[in-house]
Each structure stands twice: as structure tokens, then as C-alpha cells.
């Protein structure tokens, strides 16, 4: 059984509190694409150099290689993401392995199991180690 005990959460530097609600997706790749798009929109609003990390190699590769074909809904999302990246050269997208993304993975699993409220927060301290 997976350990769903909460990692220690810093209480300062709150970066984002997503709205309450349900995100309907046809596939896991679509869910990853929507999450990455929201992260890029957030990064775009910061107006400073930032690296957005994802453990979805397919999406990171697709953003780096426009010839890669993904499912139809993901193609539209990739187009928007590519537009953000081309208009904001300070934003980079980087692949990180799932083992380096344990807090985000814990949060996603907890949301699926309804053991974490949907008004969670992402904090800068959680991602700072990946922004190098």
C-alpha cells in the first residue's frame, strides 16, 4: 500500500491556489497537457526566468519537436503552449523523472483518493530545487 502521509509543506511563498472544480479529461495525457498549460500560463504572468518541470516525457518532447503527433485534443493544447513558449523566451520546459516529482505525485494521488481538499496550494519552496 502506498504511503499517502503528507510531505512537510512550507507555509510561505504561496504561488498558486487553483479554483475549486472538476477537470474532465478524456485521457491521462490530456490531463497532463491541461496541467502543463496552466503552469505555463502562471509562468507567463510572472515575467521572470522560470523553468516549468513535468514528468510527462511525451509532452515535453512534443513541445521540443513540433512534428510529433499527439491526440487531437492535445494538439490544440500543445499549440497554445507553443505560442506561450515562443512569446516568452524566459520560460523553459524541462522533463524530470517521476522519482524527482514525489510531492506532486503524492498530491495527485491524494486528490484521486479524495484524501486531500481540492483547494491545495503549490509553494515555491517545493519547486525551487528543480529551477536550476
Image (cartoon, grey):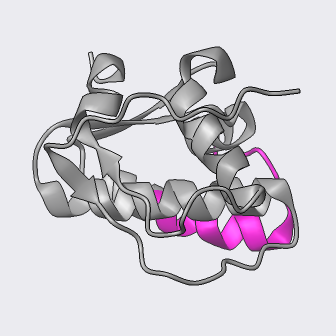
Quadrant for residue 1, please give it. Answer: top right
Q: Is 57 situated above or below 117?
A: above
Quadrant for residue 107, please give it. Answer: top right
Residue 119 included in the magenta stretch of the image? no
The majority secondary structure of the magenta stretch comes to helix
Quadrant where the image shows the C terminus: top left
Q: Is 104 situated above or below 36?
A: above
Residue 78 included in the magenta stretch of the image? yes
For the point 78% across and 54% down, which residue is it?
29
Position in image of residue 20 (x %, y %): 49, 81
Q: Is 75 situated above or below 8?
A: below
Seen in the image, is 18 located left or right of residue 73? left
For the point 66% across and 81% down, which residue is it?
22
Position in image of residue 73 (x %, y %): 77, 73
Position in image of residue 86 (x %, y %): 35, 53
The residue range painted magenta reads: 66-81
Residue placed most toward the observer, 56 or 121 = 121
Quadrant for residue 127, please give it. Answer: top left
Residue 28 visible to an observer of this rendering = yes
Seen in the image, is 67 located left or right of residue 132? right
Residue 78 visible to an observer of this rendering = no
For the point 48% across and 29% down, which residue is it?
7
For the point 19% across and 64% down, which residue is it?
45
Residue placed most toward the observer, 108 or 44 = 108
Amino acid at each position: 500500500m502506498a504511503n499517502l502521509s503528507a510531505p512537510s509543506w512550507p507555509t510561505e511563498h504561496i504561488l498558486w491556489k487553483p479554483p475549486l472544480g472538476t477537470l474532465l479529461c478524456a485521457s491521462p495525457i490530456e490531463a497532463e497537457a491541461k496541467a502543463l498549460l496552466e503552469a505555463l500560463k502562471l509562468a507567463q504572468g510572472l515575467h521572470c526566468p522560470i523553468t516549468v518541470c513535468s514528468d510527462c516525457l511525451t509532452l515535453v518532447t512534443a513541445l521540443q519537436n513540433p512534428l510529433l503527433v499527439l491526440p487531437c485534443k492535445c494538439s490544440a493544447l500543445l499549440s497554445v503552449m507553443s505560442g506561450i513558449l515562443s512569446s516568452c523566451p524566459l520560460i523553459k520546459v524541462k522533463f524530470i523523472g517521476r522519482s524527482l516529482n514525489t510531492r506532486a505525485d503524492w498530491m495527485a494521488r491524494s486528490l484521486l483518493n479524495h484524501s486531500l481538499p481540492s483547494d491545495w496550494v503549490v509553494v515555491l519552496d517545493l519547486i525551487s530545487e528543480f529551477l536550476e
